[in-house]
Structures are given as C-alpha cells and as structure tokens.
Image (cartoon, rainbow, N blue to C red):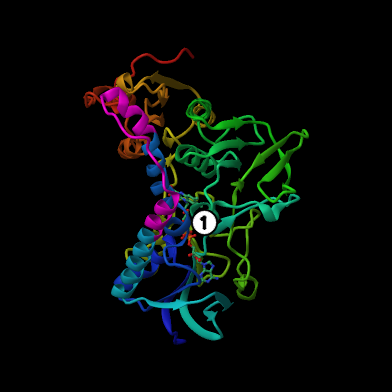
Amino acid sequence: MPTFDFDLFVIGGGSGGVRAARMAAQTGARVGLAEAADLGGTCVNVGCIPKKLYSYAAGYAEAFEESAGYGWTLKEPQFDWAHLKSQRAKEITRLNGIYASLLKNSGVTLVIGWAQLADAHTVEIGGKRHTARHLLVATGGTPFVPDIAGREHIVTSDAMFDLDPFPKRLLVVGGGYIACEFASIFNGLGSKVTQLHRRAHLLTGFDDDVRQFVANEMGKAGVDVRLNCDVTSVARNAHGHGLTVTLARGQQLEADTVLFATGRVPNTQGLGLEAAGVKLDERGAIAVDAHYRTSVPSIHAVGDVSTRVQLTPVALAEAMVVVDELFGKGKRRLDYEFIPTAVFTHPNIGTCGYSEIDARAKFGEVTVFSSEFKSLRHTLSGSTERTFMKLVVDKASDRVVGLHMVGADAGEVVQGFAVAMRAGATKAIFDSTVGIHPTAAEEFVTMREPMPG
Ligand SMILES: Cc1cc2nc3c(=O)[nH]c(=O)nc-3n(C[C@H](O)[C@H](O)[C@H](O)COP(=O)(O)OP(=O)(O)OC[C@H]3O[C@@H](n4cnc5c(N)ncnc54)[C@H](O)[C@@H]3O)c2cc1C
C-alpha cells in the first residue's frame, strides 16, 4: 500500500471545497486544502453574500419612498457608497475568518497558494509536493467576457462590489440572473442603469411568464431594459470621462461603467489537469460521472468547475456526496430535480421545478394556474409594483411540477414550497392546505381556476 501525506487533498477553498474538507476531516480523515485567494470562494467574496447585502441596501431606496404612504416623513435620504463598501468588506473579512476557523477546528491543513496537479495523487503548491489518496478539484468558475474591441474598459461582476467612484451611469450587458441582479441593485442605489441583452427576453431558462413579468417590473422600477441589442465595441471617450458603447446596429450609448455579465467559465486553466490525465467535457468543464469521479479514479471534481448548476447549495451537496462515498455513509446520487433558486432582482424571483414549456415537454399535458396582484403592502405605499405567481401541474398525476413567483421575498417563500414539491405534493394537497392570512404566499394555496388550455 503506498503511503500518502493526506487521505484527501482539496484544491479550492470555496463553497464546495471547504465543505468537503471539513466534513471529511470530521470523519477522522487527514485532509489538506489549498486556496490561492480568500477563503470562501466566489459566494463569500464576490457572489451571493456581497450581492445580497447590496440588494438589501438597494431595497431601502424603495422603502424610504413607500414609507410616506404609511405616514412617515423623512429628510432627503443620502446614500454613502464608501460606507456600504467598507461595511461589506468588514463583514466579508469576518466570514473569511470563520471559514479559516472552521477548517482549523476540523483539523484541516490549510496551504495558501496556487495548486497544480502533478499526477493522479500529487499536488504541487509553491514548489512543494503533497500526496493524497484522493484529490478533489473545487476551483469554481470565472466571468466570461467575449472578445470585443475595447474589452479592457469593461468590468465583470468581480469588480462591481468595489467600484470607485460610484457609477452615475451603469450599462449592464447580459440577460442572465447576475446581469439582472446588478441592474436592479445599482438602479436601487441611484445609478441610471441601462441593461442590454442580445436575445428577445431576459433570463433564458426561466418560465416565460416570469421572464416577461420581471422585465416589466424592472422597467417600472427604472432600469432601461433594451432587448435584441448586441454590443460590438467599447471605447474610452476622448476627454477621458466615461465610455462609449457601440451596438451592432450602429447606435451609441454612454456610460461611466460597463459591466459584462455574459456567463461564466470553469476554472480549469493552469491546474495541471493534462499532467494528471483529467479530461474536460464539451463545455470545457471537468467531465465527471454521477459520483463526481473524473477520468482519473483518484480525482473527483465538484461545484462550478464541473457542473452547469452553478449554485452554492449545489456545490455543498455535491461535496457531501463525495465525502459520504469516500469516508462515510457510502455511495449515493444527488437528485437535481426540483432545486429551488432565487434571483435578487427588485422584485425578487423565486422558482422551483419546471417552467411551463419544460413541463409540457416532459409531462405532456399540464394545467397552469396563475395570479397577478398588488400586494397588501402596496395598497398604501403608492408603489405600482405587482406580484406574480404561477403553478404548473402535471395533469396525469396532479403533482405540482413548477412553482414560480415574482414578488417581495420570493426566495423565502419558495424555499418552503420546495420541500413540499420534493415530497411530491399534488395540487389537491396545495388546495387542502390552509393559507396564512394576510400574506402574498397564501395565494399559492388558493389558486382554483386554471388558465384556459
Ligand atoms: C455575482 C454572483 C452571484 C451569485 N449569487 C448566487 C446566489 O445568490 N446563490 C447561489 O446559490 N449561488 C450564487 N452564485 C454562484 C456561487 O457563488 C457558486 O455556484 C459557488 O461559489 C460555487 O462554489 P465552488 O466551490 O464550485 O467554487 P468557488 O466558490 O468559486 O471556489 C473556488 C475557489 O477555488 C480557488 N482556486 C481556483 N483555482 C485554484 C488553484 N489552482 N489553487 C488554489 N485555489 C484555487 C478560488 O480562489 C476560489 O476560492 C453567484 C455567483 C456570482 C458570480
């Protein structure tokens, strides 16, 4: 039996890597982890957490305006961008520290530096080699920017949290959830935001009614959403202030900051994957089987570097499948059906299961229930924001296979319903559930009339 320095060595201290390392260590395994940047990875440093904090910050703008309808008189609110940035930075540093303690307290050996695979059992960091019985690649992803003229003038989501100065005019290129979230957030914080998307609708993959509804609500809130627009170049203006963006049809737009949120690519470069014999799939991600094993049996990969469901809870769940198989409860598979997700636009989107189109393709006949209304909160607030809810039901089994919401706290609402959907709840069970009154969520258990087929 060869001897190894570690039972498991993890490359990448983000969502998936940290979870795998500390849970494996808690079983008594000898575990090492390499991280080249700040612990916590994308989610903690430049993703979910700072984004949600900024989304809260943006929400106050609406709340201040709406409070007048409830009798409040406020002085003109002032927003201090530098203060928000420094508060965020403090909180992220605190979280980095928590991640470090979690690893330390579990007995994980943390190695700071860029790791490269040398062979099927060896990792090299700063010239030093570490061997392990199992290796786990959890290196995440990076924003993708198309090769257009003036690429050097644009920023990606990584830079948005520390922009200096605050962009009075922000141009967001992209129509995915990250683009929509930044458009909403900076609109709320006071930027004049234009969002350009090359397709006819935002948010490919989401339910069509949700896509249209949220684009309309974002527009009402002040985001200038322009569809079917392709950017061909970005140039710095002659006087040095601002950027000019040229569209395929020749039209030009000016902005202080241009964000390209045009997808993400897996972090597979410079990792020594070839040296170790690890193969990529047709999308450029590390190819894995249902148990996250790569083409090299001793090397696993989880999270954004290997899948297309790029969400923190998915990376965590995949990490647990690997740990259970290698060090604990045994082999099992993660079920990717009915993974709920939220988009922190203003208003939020919450969704679980299939869009109407996908449900029709998978189940055949479906019944659709939907409802659009002004929430009680906005009867006095003066806001024209509306809420949208939709259920997609498989006609044959009566199972609720799609649940979609656009409205305040949609993610909070949908998380609970996701449990019911995973348990196979039928529309009859939704109907027999007593609502909580007065809430927006009760609408999901009181929708009785299907949409005409
Ligand atoms: C703007 C934005 C918002 C998001 N919002 C959400 C959200 O609201 N909800 C949600 O669920 N998900 C969200 N995500 C996605 C989520 O952040 C990712 O799915 C998740 O972080 C993936 O985890 P991971 O472990 O695969 O990789 P990561 O968390 O990216 O971690 C990878 C780590 O590996 C390190 N690394 C890479 N190469 C090496 C190397 N060779 N040596 C050493 N270290 C290395 C990196 O520095 C990084 O720390 C968001 C992402 C972005 C960009």
Q: In x, y percent, where is residue 9?
A: 45, 75
Residue at the spot x=52%, y=70% of the render? 297
Q: In x, y percent, where is residue 300?
A: 50, 66
Residue at the spot x=27%, y=24% of the render? 70
Residue at the spot x=31%, y=71% of the render? 101
Position of 343 relative to 25 (above/below) = above
User: Taking 67 as reference, is 231 left or right?
Assistant: right
**Residue 70 is covered by the magenta coloring:** yes
Range of magenta residues: 62-89
Q: Nearer the viewer, residue 107 or 384?
A: 384
Please tell me how many numbered marks the rendered image carries. 1
Q: Nearer the viewer, residue 24 or 178?
A: 178
The residue to which callout 1 is attached is: 304
- Give the image quarter of residue 126: bottom right
Task: Identify which amino acid the numbered label 1 is placed on.
Answer: Asp
Residue 325 in sight from this viewpoint: no
Position of 55 relative to 9 (above/below) = above
Residue 74 in sight from this viewpoint: yes
Position of 219 relative to 135 (above/below) = above
- Give the image quarter of residue 229: top right
**Residue 401 is covered by the magenta coloring:** no
Mainly helix, strand or loop, the magenta region? Answer: helix
User: Taking 69 as reference, is 141 left or right?
Assistant: right
Q: In x, y percent, where is residue 269?
A: 63, 66
Tell me if mark 1 has few (under 14), some (14-19) or many (20+) residues whose alpha carbon lies within 10 angstroms of its own. many
At mark 1, the secondary structure is helix
